[in-house]
Amino acid sequence: MAPTTKSDPHIQAAVSHWASRMIANGIDYNDFQTTTARIDRWEQWSAEWSKTAAAHERLAREAAERGSPISAAEAHVRAALCHHFGKFVFFEDLAQYRAAHAATVENYRQAVAWFDPPAERVAVPYAGTSLPGYLRVPPGIARPPVVLIVCGLDSVKEEMHMLEPLLHRRGMASLCCDGPGQGESEQLPIEPEFEKPVRAILDWLATRKDVDGSRVAAIGISLGGYYVARAAAFETRLRGAAPVGGPYDMGETFDSIPSISQQAIQFRSHAPDRAAAKRNAAKLSLKGVASRIEVPFLVVFGRKDRLIPYQQAERLYAEVASRDKRLVMYEEGTHVCNNMPFAYRPLVADWMAERLRT
């Protein structure tokens, strides 16, 4: 992706850090090019992406009118992703933010019945409320194992649409919930002790008859990599964990990440100001925790990650106590290796299938 020529530093940060992520997770390249070409000031970001989303919503309506529900579902997913990436780090206008968030959720909900396999909207009881999520179970397999997909700082369950099919084709169900501070669970602040929501999810999966709740592993994306590592240290029911692009210590990186990411930590941790956000980020650390991890563990990282130093992945790998551990460092990989999803996603899916086979 060519660097942006926009002068607004927020636009520069969004394009340079997240262009490959957006395309890897379902944004059409042409939509990316035409939408960002219309944006000269950061204040336009969300509104312009909503305009692009509206074009896909119109295609969804047209497909439904001609009796093509699958085409309508595909258009709704594209619309959901456009709305999501319009607001994922946009906090300048909370009315726009909330409208785009609601449109993300609603567009995706209109599509899930036509997925293959379909997605069941679920609610996992947690902390006096519930964590909304989607469970997808591949057909023809009696009680398949489950891969829990854990989102990061600014990702949501709807963004994992491109990853899930790799798991289904290998005979695994997928479950992705909005955890504390994410998507529909933003009323809850970020939870540094992420074993708590994972424990609630595992308890809930144990009640299901259509999946094997005793065979569950977790993939964590970006900050979700910290979350699954933390959960693996304290929740021994996990059969394995694979952090992808996750930090070892978010506090150590706080000053170097883009200001819009600092703002995201402030917003999602319910911090009153930037100084409090930095203190909250410091709680997201695996110091004294990584050495407790004994379950199978796969660390995936890109050496050219400009958000999290690759040395944090090496430190995590070195401290993990598991006898079944592996570090995969992609020399050309950027953050979450979003510039090469064709490499890391099949590898992670294969690793999960091996650990969950029996």
Image (cartoon, rainbow, N blue to C red):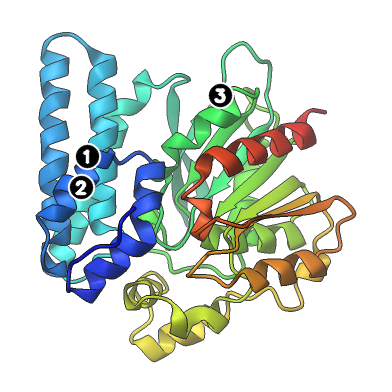
Q: Which residue is mark 1?
A: 30
Q: Amino acid at mark 1?
A: Asn
Q: Amino acid at mark 2?
A: Gln
Q: Residue at x 16, y 16 (%)?
A: 64
Q: Amino acid at mark 3?
A: Val
Query: How far apart in space, not on screen, are marks 1 and 3 (Cα)?
Result: 32 Å
> Is residue 2 shown left or right of residue 159?
left
* N-terminal-most mark, 3 or 2: 2
Give SS at disc 2: helix
What numbered label is drawn on residue 137? 3
Q: How far across and down, in percent of the image, does residue 77 sit?
A: 29, 33
What numbered label is drawn on residue 201? none
The image quadrant that residue 86 belongs to is bottom left
Residue contact between numbered discs 1 and 2, judged by CB atoms under 8 Å: yes
Regarding residue 127, the answer to whether it shows in the image is no
Relative depth, front residue between 333 and 345: 333
Q: Residue at x 12, y 23 (%)?
A: 61
Give SS at disc 1: helix
Judge depth for marks 3 and 2 and give the one in front: 2
Q: Which residue is mark 2?
A: 33
- Residue at the extreme bottom of the image, as rendered: 275
> Is residue 176 shown left or right of residue 352?
left
Q: How far across and down, in percent of the image, does residue 66 sit?
A: 13, 9
Q: How far across and down, in percent of the image, does residue 89 sit?
A: 30, 64
> Is residue 218 shown left or right of residue 339?
right
